[in-house]
Image (tube, rainbow, N blue to C red):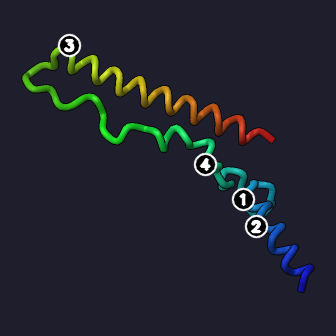
Amino acid sequence: MMGYEFSLMKERIDALSGASSKTAAGLRAVRIEDVQPLLQFPANPKSAKAGGASPTKAEFDALVDDVHKIWTFLAAQSMALQDRSKP
């Protein structure tokens, strides 16, 4: 029974790491540390719908700040995942 349990555990670890020939490398597990910034992402954006026909400078600047935060987060996630996906 011990051999079967070891084999099953190895199969699960290989699948999570993407090392299994049965599992595509794109389906491997993601570590929490790789998505840590997502857990700290603000719940609400700074920006809101413009109050009038065109946004004020403050409304526009808040939108730019939100877009920059999203871009910075996505770039960091992309780099982390690219580093992890290298053999």
- How many angstroms separate mark 2 from mark 1 (CA)? 6 Å
Q: Nearer the viewer, residue 54 or 56?
A: 56
In the picture, the quarter occupied by the N terminus is: bottom right
Percent position (x, y) of residue 56? 16, 16
Circle 3 sits on which residue? 57
Rounded to the nearest angstrom, the CA distance separating label 4 from label 1 is 13 Å
**Element marked by disc 3:** helix
Residue that carries the numbered disc 1 in the rendered image: 16
Residue 42 locus on image (x, y percent): 38, 37
* Residue 61, percent from left and from top: 28, 17
Q: Earlier in the sequence, mark 4 or mark 3?
A: 4
Q: Looking at the figure, which quarter contains the C terminus?
A: top right
**Alpha carbons under labels 4 and 3: distance apart:** 37 Å
Look at label 2 and name its amino acid: Arg
Left-right relation of 42 to 30: left
What residue sits right under mark 4 in the picture?
A: 32
Q: Residue drawn at (50%, 32%), measured in percent from left and top?
A: 73
Q: Which residue lies at the image location 21% right of the left edge and 21% below the top edge?
A: 59
